[in-house]
Image: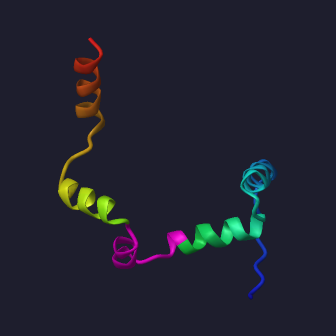
Amino acid sequence: MAKLTLNVDESVVTRAKRYAARRGISVSRLVEQFLALVSMSPRSEAEDLPPILARLRAELKGASAHSAAYRKHLERKYR
């Protein structure tokens, strides 16, 4: 396993330690999981999706998610 030294703001480190402790993992494992997640290629990410999410993603492909349209939707919904 390779060793990595990072410079991170103290408040971020504190929050990361709390987050990791609540999940019963080390901060090193948390960073490793994050880096593994963000370094995935889009193709392998799609392959790893559960079938229901893959279908939803396919159905929503090309759908717009503009904040103005969503705001109008919420205004109509909560009148």
Tell me residue 19's x, y (percent).
72, 51
Q: In this view, does 1 lie above or below 29?
A: below
Tell me residue 45's x, y (percent).
40, 72
Q: 10 and 45: which one is in front?
A: 45
Q: Would you identify the image quadrant in which residue 43 lies? A: bottom left
Q: Residue at point 51% right, 69% down?
A: 38
Residue numbers of the magenta segment: 37-49
Q: Residue at point 68% right, 67% down?
A: 31
Q: Would you identify the image quadrant in which residue 16 lies? A: bottom right
Q: 59 and 75: which one is in front?
A: 59
For residue 21, side relative to residue 49 (left or right): right
Dominant SS of magenta comes to helix
Scheme of colours in the image: rainbow
Furthest residue to the top?
Answer: 79
User: Where does the N terminus fall, quadrant-wise?
Assistant: bottom right
Q: Residue at point 75% right, 63% down?
A: 25
Q: Does the magenta stretch include residue 42?
A: yes
Q: Is residue 46 magenta?
A: yes
Tell me residue 35's x, y (percent).
59, 72
User: Where does the C terminus fall, quadrant-wise?
Assistant: top left
